[in-house]
Amino acid sequence: MANVAVSGPARPLRGLADQAQLVTGEGVLIDVPAASLPLRMLSALIDWLIYGAVLVALIVAVVFASRGASAAGVGTLLLVAMVAAFIVLPVTIETLSRGRSVGKLVCRLRVVRDDGGPIVFRHALLRGLLGFVELWLMQGVPAFVAACCNSRCRRLGDLTAGTYVVRLERGLQLEPPPGMPPHLRTWVAHSDMAALPDGLALAIRQFLTRRAGLSPAARDALASSLAAQVRPLVAPAPPPYTHVEDLLAAVMVRRGDLEAARLSREETTRRRLLGEPSSPDPTAGVVGGVSAGRIRA
């Protein structure tokens, strides 16, 4: 997943069924690319070799440790060794590494929830149990068929656990959004802004960062169109003769600040409920809705 400078965690883009697209408080669209089937197969092959080697080592240990034991006892120990190698070990590794394994580490992959968040023990357990059946007992056939039938290449374990595998790509540093126009600072501080639709926020963000490459006519027309959609969402109206591009920049900064304030309240509430000591403001370093923090897969 691309690393993107944001002021807080991204969330699903409202109005889209595919939650692989997320949008930040500043209207930055983050694409969370699902891993391709060949990459997943390569990652699984590496893991299979490792888990197979662990199983062989356990079998050798059982054979040497069970000399003179009954056939039933040896069979039980072998079954325990298989469960340990193919279920306990993968589930433990994915839980402790929050969605990684040796194969995924080599291929730069990670298992995440459908909303892009890190997995926990419950997700790893469901994936491990279903993986033992579809990958080991049935030679991967159900997993391959399921992965070919959905856009995120999810096997049955992913569909059951509500997870999918993403690619970890090189970091991408986005151009920071325009700052607050000084003459609109007082107006913004005393204004009320309704929730800005994600699609509109994304369009404004893209316009503000790419406007220099537009022709004057196209730039004016697009700015006027976006401002017409923004004005009904802000009260009171901006000062007379406010340039439409300054209005758009001020609204985006205000949106980012509101998002930062929301994150601060949620962090304060979480710490109070958990009884954790207070810490510096989680939005510290946020200037005009932009933080030096990074979002990771």
Image (tube, rainbow, N blue to C red):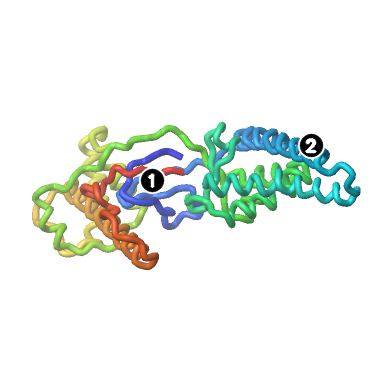
> Is 190 located above or below residue 70 in the figure?
below
Give the residue number, with chain letter if any, for mark 1.
Answer: 29
Image point (33%, 46%), residue name = 6
The residue lying toward the viewer, choosing from 38 and 211, is 38
Observer-nearest of 124 and 217: 124
Residue found at x 58% / y 46%? 94
Residue 88: x and y in percent read 67, 49
Mark 2 and mark 1 lie on one chain; the one further toward the N terminus is 1
Residue pictured at 20% horizontal, 36% vertical: 216
Query: Relative to 270, is 32 on the left or the right?
Result: right
Looking at the rendered structure, the secondary structure element under dot 2 is helix
Residue 258: image location, x then y, percent: 26, 58
Q: Specify the label residue 60 is tagged with.
A: 2
Q: Please say whether residue 133 is visible from this viewpoint.
A: yes
- Please state if 133 lies on the left or on the right of 221 as rendered: right
Q: Residues within 10 Å of mark 1 (few under 14, many from 20)?
A: many
The extreme bottom residue here reads 273
What amino acid is found at the position of numbered circle 1 in the picture?
Leu
CA separation in Å, label 2 and label 1: 52 Å
**Residue 162, percent across and down?**
58, 55
